[in-house]
Image: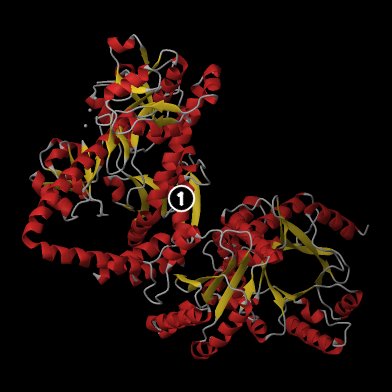
Amino acid sequence: MLKVFILCFLLTQILLAASYIPKNIKEEKILESYRDTQLVLGLKATDFDNTIIDNQSLNTIVEDLFKNYLRLNIRVVKGSWDELLSMYSKKEIDILGSITQSEERKENSVFSLPLYDDSIYLATSNIEKYNLKDLKSLKEQDIFVTKDSIYTGYLKKFLRGNDIKVNIIEVEDSFLEKDGIFLTSKYNVVGWENTIKIGYLPDISIGLQKKLNDLTAIVNNALLEKYQGDIAKYLEKQSNVIYKNKFLKSLTQEERKYLENLSQITIALEPNNTLSYYSKDMKKFIGVIPFFIERFSKRTGINFKIVNDRNNNWNNIYNDFLEKKIRVVPLPENKEWSEDIIFTEPIYNPTLYKVSSFFSHNTKIGVVKGSIEESFVQEYYLKDDILFYKDYDELENSLNNYTINAAFLFDINKMDTSKFKVDEFMKIPISLGLYKSDEILKEIINKGIKNGLSIRRIEEEADIVKKQEAFNEYQRFQLTNKILYLLLAISLMFGMISIYKMLLNHKITKELKKDLITSLPNRVEFLNFIDEKKELKGYAIVVDINNFKEINDKYGQSSGDDILRIVADKLKRIFINQNIYRVSGDEFYIFSEEEFLIERLEELKKEMHSLKLSYQVDLSIGFYKNYNKNLETSFKYAYMAMEEVKKKNNFYYVEATDELIEKKEREYSIKSLLRNKNLSGLYGVYQPKFNIKNKNIVGAEVLARWKDEKLGFISPGEFIPIAEEINLIHLIDYKIANEGIKFINILKKNNLIDENFRMSFNLSMKSLERDDVVSVVKALLKENKVSGDYMEIEITESIFSTNLKTTLEKINELKKMNISLSMDDFTAGHSTVSLLPILPLDVVKFDKGILDAIGTKGDLVASNIYMALIGLIKDLNLKIVSEGIETKLQLEFLEKANVDIGQGYIFSKPIEDLNFIKKLTEKNTGS
């Protein structure tokens, strides 16, 4: 039993986690291995996949799964289906965000659990020319299909079954031929009237190259934990938005005005009928009409109110309607009633059932061999996923044992469906009766019904609920009888068992709310706390154990658990009677209503001294004093402060001041821009490089600057460290390299530079580590028609922290393009000097640190060091660039020292391209 409790607890933690928690060591190793390489994710550039609703689209959900939840190094490629499929076939794409499963595709791919189901339709926007409701109208027509689409096979089978001959025309994207008849997914024609359903499709899944087979189980876990639900909610929202917009457009001006003034509509329901009935369990009306009301309201904005209760009989309801106490009743239309009442279009008209296990997460489907259901299942599922059984009893046993996830059958009475989830796939017309004076309301409701509101689906959902309730009632009846017989025989024993179960349930509930290692309340309790006590005032405190992962790796998990317990005990001892929670691996959240917080934090600092000596364990603490914010926001601010502490070596705790909060929110905004690749405000500026002797411009360094519409000017000191922190510095390096190369092309075309001119750009350590760095630079040169002779790459001594062998191979490839290599920020440091014989350098840029001492008290020492370094570089036959020249004294010193090239504010600050051209013309013509 303890294992079951632990499993439930871990499942709760997983569901609440911000990122994926590996289920075992094997999964952790798999994820780490893939994080070291970049994976390419292909996403379709269609309206269906890219439409944003509540800040989400299907593409952003799938992208979030891989980038943020699994924290993989993902590059996204968007394109048409034909382009993506071609790239996937060539293995230029590792993952397809959505793909229809097929036997052919299974040869080269592995598939995730389903994202959503799909059907295919023939559709057209040309209502006047084509009538797709009549199958005969399809004969000899041109049908447009997307090239290489799996849909085409299903269309041909449909046409053969109906003995229809058509002209099938393959195009790049069938949806672009919407004025004709085209084949497409149901999601592309939601709300369209002129359509015909061809059939169901196999499930839509995420497709992965076979080399990623070990990643599939992790992707499936992520889908089950979070993303299947997100996709289902998104599709429902998307459908409601489409239908509501279409409904409102369909209304006349008179109907719109009527709708604006319409108050709540009263409706009465039959309390014990197939159409609607009162559920004792749910304590409300359920069935076709209640479900219709709910769905109709979401898609039109019209509100209904059920005014009767379960004790009303139908005669009383109908009389109340005739007396105009009730405005709407559901009725079967007939001549007798038609004299006094007007009716809407029918809303209820009979079904293959899918019976699914509540718990199994495999993809196996069961069916009885030789049954009608067999032929249906083979149309929509992969052969390997179908298991055959000799009879329905054997099929039901497999469902009970979780050997299969679902079974298909027409007659659910053959199975005890109370144990399973039942879904219907596939008749006395029932309408809504209204007063004769409600003609406009009738027309409005009719338009809502015609506007894609699937009554069949509502009927199916209602019937499922009713059958489930009937079986539940039957089971309760059986259980009651068994209990009565058992009580007669062993009443005492039963009483003891009941008491034991009650105590056990209490213990389980208590344990599930507790962290297993520290016995502190866990994340579940924390979330309940901030929800129930939203407006509580006091201190929100976030405590993080520094380097906890390294401690676990070095000393083992048991030592890590010991440290967690020690820290928890210290927190409980210092923050007596306060709210303390362990919310994740190494984080504790505290809410304190008492004053004297600083004194308590100082006491905690002293308490941690022994632990720091033994394990080098320290804490980072952020806190926020809540005056007028809710608790969720208060802890968010405290977390910001904790993050700031982790960046500083000499700080133990920091308060989340308004200034810090503003800074962190600005930082989050910059991260968001980078992660979304929104770099439209990023541009290059150019700082000239001068010949020290004649002062002519002989080159330039292109530097990154950023202006954003909302954030204003973002200094390099802000965005470059952030980009490096989130491993996106290459986006900046590549864009600025492109700016510099483009500018060289402009200068060349206008004959403003000669062959000795060099434009330098920076490549960070992390950019050099990327596999694509050589191909990107090569592509930029080719695209802009610029020779590498004009370019210079600046690197720093941080190159030593990379895989030097691999990095040198990339540098040599860049050198083959005739690109010069420059060592930036060169100083007298041993590590920098040691790089000189290793790297194929052309230029050394002297750091301004030593030069700044020229003209100060340390002038003599600085001059001697500088001269020694110049001699060293000259002996290696390398060019010297001295950067950071700001004073005349420094310039005179460099002239005497025979330095080649200078760069600094004494010549020019970094300037934009037009100003650079102007300065270039002035300097080099002597004007």
Which one is nearer the viewer's eye here, 700 or 214? Answer: 214
- At a point 53% along the width and 81% down the height, the residue shown is 574
The answer to whether 193 appears left or right of 373 in the picture is right
Callout count: 1
The answer to whether 438 appears left or right of 409 in the picture is right
Relative to 901, say whether 263 is above or below: above
The answer to whether 407 appears left or right of 214 in the picture is left
> Which quadrant would the N terminus be assigned to in this image?
bottom left
The answer to which image quadrant residue 668 occupies is bottom right
Relative to 527, say whether 749 is above or below: above
Tag 1: Cα neighbours inside 10 Å, few (<14), some, or many (≥20)?
some
Residue reaching furthest right?
927
- At a point 53% along the width and 74% down the height, the residue shown is 543
x then y, percent, for residue 829:
69, 85
x then y, percent, for residue 409:
17, 39
The answer to which image quadrant residue 317 occupies is top left
The answer to which image quadrant residue 739 occupies is bottom right
Coloration mode: secondary structure
Residue type (three-letter) at the residue carrying disc 1: Ile
Residue reaching furthest left?
489
Which one is nearer the viewer's eye here, 710 or 49? Answer: 710
> Which quadrant would the C terminus be assigned to in this image?
bottom right
Relative to 473, say whether 553 is above or below: below
Residue 707 visible to the viewer = yes
The answer to whether 375 appears left or right of 769 in the picture is left
x then y, percent, for residue 800:
59, 78
x then y, percent, for residue 725:
58, 67
Residue 166 visible to the viewer = no
Which one is nearer the viewer's eye here, 263 or 847? Answer: 263
Q: Secondary structure at mark 1?
A: helix
Mark 1 sits on what residue?
61
